[in-house]
Amino acid sequence: MPQVFEGLKVADFTWAAVGPIMSRYLANYGATVVRVESATRPDVVRIAPPFKGGQTHVDRSAYYSIFNPGKHSLTINMAQPKGREVAHRLVLWSDVVMESFAPRVMKNWGLDYESLRREKPDLIMISTTNLGMTGPHAARAGFGTQLVSLAGFTHLTGWPDGDPNQPYGAYTDLVAPRFGAAAIIAALDHRRRTGQGQYIDLSQLEASAHFLAPVMMDYFASGREAFRSGNRDPQATPHGAFPCQGDDRWLAIACTTQQEWQALCRAMGRPELATDERFATLKARQENESELEGMIGEWTRGQVAEEAMRRLQGAGVPAGVVQNGKDVFLDPQLRHRGYWVELEHPEIGRHHYQASPFILSRTPAQLRPSPCLGQHNELVCRELLGISEEEYTQLLVEGALE
């Protein structure tokens, strides 16, 4: 059957993570996505490790590959007037335009929404920036590695007696795309029904702060300000990661009910702890949490993490191995679901990609390898934009496509 987004044309001017993850959803399900890039200023993710085989190259980054399967790469020198003309033609060809620059950039190129909608009223455009397109700080550029602190996550991540710790990676880059993809789909549905385009202003700060709603609501309602608490949780004790046999092997355990706590005691061979006055209630366990964690750690140190997980889960105790990268890659559940797909990349050869995180029964995702830089210049210009061979050659000579 035709793919969900088959026939949809997308001009993707974004870079790094947020925009490419959004456009990946569309490409996975049939959209023609053209990534606008530049050989003079490549996407920062193209030069981010790890590189296949340890060879540093703009076409060998596993990071870039996993964000961009199934797309076309068109290199444009936006400093060249002829380059901007090509970008303009690409926009008029497209149904959806995506960009992640500071607010002034697209306007300086004449590619802002207000300019484009006069030529193409049904155009859908999304701008995804750190702080949104309006407001006193809108022009501030940056990355999710800084934004995660501005959003408040870093204040909550770490141990009570230690400094703030940043969550791994650019956390906001990994949550904001889900909002953007949903907004694009809603705008497409609106256009289908009304013929009207839409402009979407996605603030990554606001999208990610959404995930701190519980602590914000607590502050609004009670004035309590959340603080770093390590792995502990006010609604569950024990709640943490405990060391197991082997090098850096851990088991996460969380007991939210008395039944789970009692089942944990039996599984540990310590049923008497369930009625010990130090641990008999949630309040008592929290008052003696350090002592309790020490006892659980003594037990887990003698356990193989996977075996202990299965034993506890079988007893009704929420528990899970803290998996490393190798564990996730070999995870039998993910392999059963076909989560890892091996494709042949023109530069790095056989390479594993993440499949779509959801499966549509009638139109499952179809993955193709990520593109090399500028790999589809001629295809996009000649076949999609209708540029003649003579004009295409002139664009190459003038340096507009680099």
Image: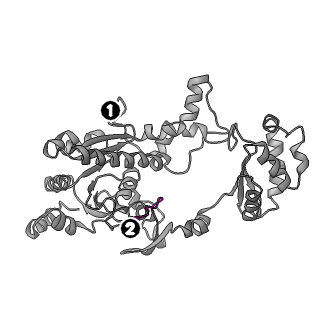
Q: Is residue 344 above or below residue 238?
A: below
Q: Earlier in the sequence, mark 2 or mark 1?
A: 1
Residue 221, position in %: x, y? 58, 23
| Residue position marked by numbered label 2 in the rendering | 366
Q: Where is the C terminus found, in terms of image quarters? A: bottom left
**Disc assigned to residue 134:** 1
Q: Which residues are magenta?
A: 356-370
The three-letter code of the residue at mark 1 reads: Thr
| Front residue of this view, candidates 288 and 268 | 268
Identified at 36% across, 37% down, the residue is: 132
The alpha-carbon separation of the residues under discs 2 and 1 comes to 37 Å
Residue 307, position in %: x, y? 75, 65
- The count of marks equals 2
Identified at 26% across, 39% down, the residue is: 104
Q: Is residue 247 above or below residue 162?
A: below
Residue 333, position in %: x, y? 59, 66
Seen in the image, is 105 located left or right of residue 394?
A: right
| Front residue of this view, candidates 263 and 211 | 263
Decide whether the magenta segment is chiefly helix, strand or loop.
loop
Seen in the image, is 110 located left or right of residue 367?
A: left
Identified at 58% across, 26% down, the residue is: 219
Q: Is residue 368 visible?
A: yes
- SS class of the residue under badge 1? loop
Density class for disc 2 (Cα within 10 Å; few <14, some 14-19, many ≥20) is some
Density class for disc 1 (Cα within 10 Å; few <14, some 14-19, many ≥20) is few
